Image (cartoon, grey):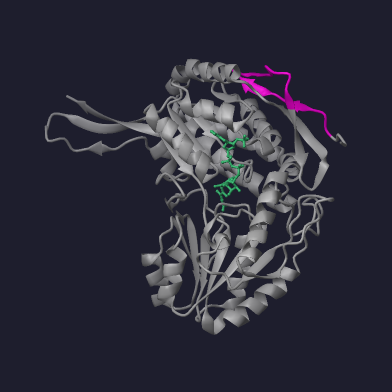
Amino acid sequence: MTITVEQTYNNHINGVWKTDSEEKKPSINPAHPREVVGYYTMSESATLHEAVEAAAAAKREWRKMAEPARGDILYKAAAVLEARVEEIAETMTKEMGKTLPEAKGETMRGVQILRYYAGEGMRQNGDVIPSTDKDALMFTNRTPLGVVGVITPWNFPVAIPVWKIAPALVYGNTVVFKPAQEAAVTAAKVVECLAEAGLPEGVLNFVTGSGSVIGRGLAEHPDVNGITFTGSEQVGRGIGQAALARGAKYQLEMGGKNPVIVTEDADLDAAVDAVISGGLKSTGQKCTATSRVIVQSGVYEGFKEKLLTKVKDIKVGDGMNKDSWMGPCASEKQFRSVTSYIETGKQEGAALLCGGETMPEEGYYVTPAVFDNVDPDMTIAREEIFGPVLALMKVETLEEAIETANDTEYGLSASIFTNNIQESLSFMDDIEAGLVRINAESAGVELQAPFGGMKNSSSHSREQGEAAKEFFTSIKTVLVK
Ligand SMILES: NC(=O)C1=CN([C@@H]2O[C@H](COP(=O)(O)OP(=O)(O)OC[C@H]3O[C@@H](n4cnc5c(N)ncnc54)[C@H](OP(=O)(O)O)[C@@H]3O)[C@@H](O)[C@H]2O)C=CC1
Ligand SMILES: O=C(O)CCC(=O)C(=O)O
């Protein structure tokens, strides 16, 4: 194995960077699987307990700090992250494969999220509500949950941790953060920025290790008052059950099987661009990625031809290269999962029109695959693939299109391309999705707006924007007489 970086990224507990274990794991560059981006610790339960203890000990003082002062620390963290954008984006590209421009965009999004929640420190914290008693003053006051566990995936190694940690902190919670192993080095750098901004000891603790030990341990820990998770549905369900069993608050953002409907009234070129961007950027590894493309029969062949022409032109390669449009899958596990879905698609009778080629000796690359003749019952039309695979499905009417779009256990994001206002309105009304997009791609969320899904895509809660306040605080209703 070629070792490129020997640095070990430790845990951060009670304000100190340290490690408890001799077991280190390498974080691998999926574009060059012989390259190591850095090492992280496979922590044990005892370390998790130490981190939770530190967070619990720090929570009173942090809650008592004025909210604007907590916001000020986030402003400083934003400045530190911004100053390190090139370096952190490069680490992200090397660690999980997305292209450098995407990684820079995501890191800058982290900066903006920090600033947005820093501003929350100066905003309203409750409402005055008229009391039936004319001599009483009644109002609500939001109070933090206490210790919050943050469990994140590898696909947005900066944005997802930041959109969970920043609101948790500004609303007065202390945090224990467990990142995905595949993105542990990038996550450590995000924590460095927050620590450098002057967070008091114990307010943000960072513990790397396996999901089954550290993640599960967080969900089950009696001193963790809330858990926020993004990742697979299977793991999310387990976390929700563990939290529910002990009465902790939880928030889960999980999978998607996001449809784009293209009607006979659509601008086909715009629809093609949106399907490519929404389905294939980040190598299709977004919970909001376009996966099913449901096209009305009258424009099916025309749309398919335009799509194939552009997809075949996509340059796949190392995300550090300027001419790569799409990087590798984030890990060997993800590569195997995606290629096995492609095989299943072929075996079940879908027609692979292009893509699906691999170069495993070079890196975990899969060229973008487009399937034709996809039947709604096929595995590739039902399960989240999380890779560069598009399933084309032909329908006759808008009603059939919406019915097909809703024929999934998920309900995260859905788009329609049409210039017909009645079609837009019907779609908006009938589609079962938390993010409804008209003439816009299925992926890409705005940090100031609520984000989350229906059905099995989430725990019916929402993240980001003002919605974050609902999760990270409890309401006290106060009556003063
Ligand atoms: N909604 C989304 O944005 C995402 C969806 N996914 C979906 O999940 C599939 C598998 O990806 P994968 O990375 O394995 O996702 P996981 O759900 O396994 O991982 C997400 C996070 O949860 C942790 N975790 C794993 N097991 C447990 C557990 N028992 N208790 C608590 N935490 C746990 C992981 O730790 P560890 O570091 O050990 O993995 C990681 O930090 C993808 O193919 C995709 O379909 C994946 C990522 C993001
Ligand atoms: O589409 C986006 O920008 C966010 C997607 C996301 O949250 C995810 O993939 O987990």
Q: Position of residue 381 (x, y in %)?
A: 54, 62
**Image quarter (top left, top right, bottom left or bottom right) of the N terminus:** top right
Q: In the shown orientation, is residue 311 left or right of residue 261? A: right
Q: Position of residue 397 (x, y in %)?
A: 44, 79
From this viewpoint, is residue 364 visible?
yes
Q: Position of residue 415 (x, y in %)?
A: 50, 65
Q: Residue at x 48, y 77 (%)?
A: 419
394 or 442, which is in the foreground? 394
Q: Residue at x 46, y 55 (%)?
A: 410
Q: Position of residue 147 (x, y in %)?
A: 47, 25
Q: Residue at the far bottom: name it.
A: 298
From this viewpoint, is residue 115 visible?
no
Q: Residue at x 58, y 27 (%)?
A: 213
Q: Determine which quarter of the picture holds residue 151.
A: top right
**Image quarter (top left, top right, bottom left or bottom right) of the C terminus:** top left
140 or 305, which is in the foreground? 305
- The range drawn in magenta is 5-24
Indicate whether residue 465 is drawn in magenta. Answer: no
Q: In the shown orientation, is residue 13 left or right of residue 240? A: right
Q: Residue at the far right: name it.
A: 2
169 or 26, which is in the foreground? 26
